[in-house]
Amino acid sequence: MTQESFDSAFIEQQRSALLQLREQLQDTLRSLKNEVSSLESSHSSGGHDESDNAANAPQAEVGEQKLSVETLRLSNIDRALKKIDEGTYGYCESSGKPIAKARLEAQPAALHSIEEAERLEKEAQAPGT
């Protein structure tokens, strides 16, 4: 498996896009961590009345969920950058088949072809899994 189907200019364009996305995501993660921390500390400090604490709890939970999603996105970006270094960028991690160039242009951190991503999503949503 090599990057022969993608020229070096495309690979470098993707590396640059991934690094830019990574930097933006790291900023977002810092902001989310600060927001969640602030909500949790105001909830645990007891300095507010019960209605304030009740309102902050769901906000902190939503913040934690966002943090989890963004952390996964960062992990995918890091994996895509590693695949560039390994010479396997642009190949589906499940099937080993090439990922469409248009998909990579739209989602530089894509690790799976559209077909495999849809299959994995269906599996994740299937009852009992």
Image: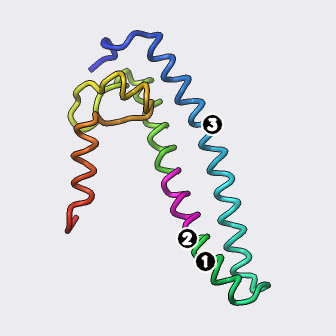
Residue ID for mark 2: 61
Q: Under tag 1, what secondary structure? A: helix
Verify CB contact (< 8 Å) between mark 1 and mark 3.
Answer: no
* Mark closer to the observer (1, 3): 1
Q: Is residue 23 above or below residue 17?
A: below
Is 66 left or right of 56, judged from the image as shown? left
* Mark closer to the observer (2, 3): 2
Q: Under tag 3, what secondary structure? A: helix
Q: CA distance from mark 1 to mark 2?
A: 6 Å
Q: Which residues are magenta?
A: 62-70
- Amino acid type, label 1: Ala
* Mark nearer the N terminus (1 vs 3): 3
Q: Is residue 129 above or below residue 121?
A: below
Q: CA distance from mark 1 to mark 3?
A: 29 Å
Name which residue lies at 71% across and 82% down.
Answer: 52
Within 10 angstroms of label 1, few (less than 14), some, or many (20 or more) residues? some
- Amino acid type, label 2: Glu
Residue 57 tag number? 1
Residue ID for mark 3: 23
**Magenta span has 63?**
yes
Q: CA distance from mark 2 to mark 3?
A: 25 Å
Verify CB contact (< 8 Å) between mark 1 and mark 2.
Answer: yes
Question: Which of these two is toward me, 68 or 79?
Answer: 68
Q: Position of residue 72 (x, y in %)?
A: 46, 49
Within 10 angstroms of label 2, few (less than 14), some, or many (20 or more) residues? some
Name which residue lies at 48% across and 54% down.
Answer: 69
Q: Position of residue 107 (x, y in %)?
A: 43, 33
